[in-house]
Amino acid sequence: MAFSTTPILQQNHRFLFSFKSKASNPHFSFHSFHLNKPLPLPLLPLSSSLSSFPSSPSSSSFFLTRVSTAPVEYAPPAPDFNFYREISRLKSLRSELSAANTVEDKLAVVDRDARVKRFFEGLSRSGFATVLASLNVDSYGLFLVKCLVAAGQEHVLGLEFELSEFEAARSDIKSALYALVEMIEKLDNASERSGSNTGFGLKSEEVGDFEKLLKTLGEIEQFYDCIGGIIGYQITVLELLAQATCERETTNWSHHINKLMECQFTEIHAPRGLDLSQDTEYASQAAIWGIEGLPDLGEIYPLGGSADRLGLVDPDTGECLPAAMLPYCGRTLLEGLIRDLQAREFLYFKMYGKQCITPVAIMTSSAKKNHEHITSLCERLGWFGRGRSSFQFFEQPLVPSISAEGGQWVVAKPFTPVCKPGGHGVIWKLAYDKGIFKWFYDHGRKGATVRQVSNVVAATDVTLLALAGIGLHHGKKLGFASCERRLGATEGINVLIEKKTLDGRWAYGVSCIEYTEFDKFGITNGSLSPKSLQENFSANTNILYVDLASAELVGSSKNENSLPGMVLNTKKPVVYEDAFGNRHSVSGGRLECTMQNIADSFFNTSSSRCYNRVEENMDTFIVYNERRRVTSSAKRKRILADKSLHQTPDGSLLDILRNVHDLLSKCDIRLPVIKGNDEYVDSGPPFLILLHPALGPLWEVSRQKFHGGSISMGSELQIEVAEFLWRDVQLDGSLIIEAENIMGSIRIDENGEPILQYGQRCGRCKLQNVKVLNKGIDWDSGNNIYWKHDVQRFEAFKVILHGNAEFEATDVILQGNQVYEVPNGYILKITPGKSGLSVQLDPIEQSMMDSGSWFWNYKIKGTHIQLELVEL
């Protein structure tokens, strides 16, 4: 059956469903839940001036995920505050502002607002406008300040008052502003400006805070222009708070949900897709598509989050750090992302003999100096040998935190609202606004893979390559990598939505329900138990493939569809420090968007209901794999009293080691089994093995480099070289192989940038019929931090390969604490001697300087990759 590809996102629709234990559609053999025809929304609609879609039923082709997740204990607004009256006032103002073309016109509109008039008329005797002028506030800055007041947030300026009681007693903060005005009247501006005081009663720090406020307001006004700027932002907040209030007061969930869904019929199913762990032949083919399509792919990293749960602090300065800077397994998490990417590029080179440098777009923010830290890291590491031109940064704006009571912005001190990033869902609009899509096109890219920095296993084996391969090969718009959902995890679920719209068409698409929305959907209180939820719906992991042109269409839309999955999550308190260093915690949240809900713009529609193989015809798709090969995150700091290692660096390391066990045990290598996390709460793991991803990254490749032998309990193995051979090695202790040129050497390109040249002058290592015996790690040391790879050792056998150096050990026992450094251009061989070991250092022949004395030759055989050891 033919599908049209128009989106089916219903404008202003709330994503709500009730549940039933039995699917109403017998042709879907998996779990589903159902909605009947709803009643109209009680909330006021968006003004037509901000919507590009007609209101006729036939045009109801857009579905918006916008929810509130306020907790049950949330206190209702003050009795005299009417959400709907305030929303109506602000919507009228927004409508008028949308028709104004110039700043002057917009000022004229906002000046007519009753709240603004009363505020500024009340201050006129004290010359407040003069104060703004004296601070060099231009017309646009004045407009921003007046929008702040119109939105009911004048307290941000340090002026808290009731409109009817403006002449009431002044607060200390208010007095400071009045002092500012008096100083203007009495002092000469030019002569009094010196030191840390501006001459107007405000210190330089306070003037700086005011300037930062203007910058924040300007960013909100500009970025959220698709919903009406500052005014639209506040409208959205109030609508979600009002909706939350309605939900808490309702006792008839079915009736409530029906009112919110404007469609005739809705079912949610567990989406079917390729299981990479089961259909290994197709998984291998999909991975090869992903490798050969690498020149068409970009990489997108949303790194702008504040990562408060991780609690990462610089040990030297005490400064809070972003998640990308977490030292993990010997390097930062951001370095880990780039290593995974370079491993795929190295695989591409080995298969096709061509260089491929993937452009990387990184979304940052100013939270915890996120942007500054990340760019500095890239500069310090020489842009990872990729060149500055292969990176593009775009900084997401910070948004104000909102009190759950009345939608007031939380303020730490005058002019300083408490701001945090507005969720990774802003990435699509921001990418369009900042020219990221065009930048990708200029690099010849058609699609991109998206992954988060805290997920340390996303690139394991075929997962990421197969996802991208299917997306590219079949021309899909969006793909999800998913897995079994762990009970209690703070992660959403992937769902297949089937709905009949008001115009009678059927719509289908894979989407996501965030974990913060579960209460809203009645999941915890409905007939569907958390146990059955876990069994029937898979985890949303935020590992995505996206078609760039399709994502750009969404990001460039001039309405709220460019901000998918808007949510006001007030389940976690807003924690901040005031000007005096006092810590506060208030019930509230911030307006956030979810990047994965761009899927709601890619639904396919049909004139009749589809019963079979519906997924094959959709623009969205999903692939599955074992959980530890898809997601394991280092996103929260472990609390010693907490026995759970889930989503901690400690727990994610155990999943890495489980994957290593799965990989090496299939290579006839005996090694200990990793038990459940509970076994390692008070102790270290049974072994520590860290393998460079360029050894694969596909396990099919890695398994041809390892064969036979054993790794005993308490051993440590670290391999930092791509050209590597392990044959019948018995490890009882610590073995560390480090290469300076892991995948190639650095050359200077025509632009003077250092670029990694894959396959050239690599370090190499062969171990054949070798025993390694030493005391290894001091597992009883209380200073060991295993997930950092910061451990105390008694002994280790370590080889350091400089440049294109090579190391070979054959038929020997390597004992004790030894370090061999092999210089560039040489090969070190250890073989049996007459009395002990024979250690021989020889220069590499000149003709082999680039290629080495041996290398692995990669060949494609059908859907598989076969390796051949070539000796020169």
Image: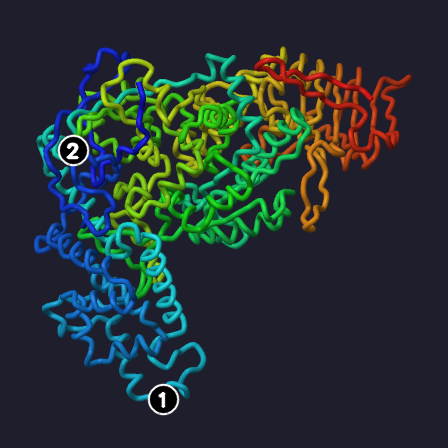
Q: Which residue is mark 2?
A: 262
In this orientation, which residue lies closer to the viewer: 478 or 654? 478
Mark 1 is on which residue type?
Asp
Relative to residue 58, is residue 52 depicted above or below? below
Q: Which residue is mark 1?
A: 188
Dot 1 surroundings within 10 Å: few (below 14), some, or many (20 or more)? few
Q: Is residue 260 left or right of residue 294?
A: left
The structure residue drawn at horizontal position 40% and vertical position 28%, both measured from the top left corner, is 480
Colour treatment of the image: rainbow
Q: How many marks?
A: 2
Dot 2 surroundings within 10 Å: few (below 14), some, or many (20 or more)? many
Instruction: Tell me if I can see residue 399 in this picture.
Output: yes
In this orientation, which residue lies closer to the viewer: 484 or 413? 484
Q: Is residue 634 left or right of residue 752?
A: left
Per the image, label 2 sits on a secondary structure element best described as: loop
Per the image, label 1 sits on a secondary structure element best described as: loop
Extreme residue in the right direction: 834
The structure residue drawn at horizontal position 36% and vertical position 51%, both measured from the top left corner, is 420
The structure residue drawn at horizontal position 34% and vertical position 88%, both measured from the top left corner, is 187
Q: Quadrant of residue 597?
A: top left
Nearest-to-viewer mark from 2 and 1: 2
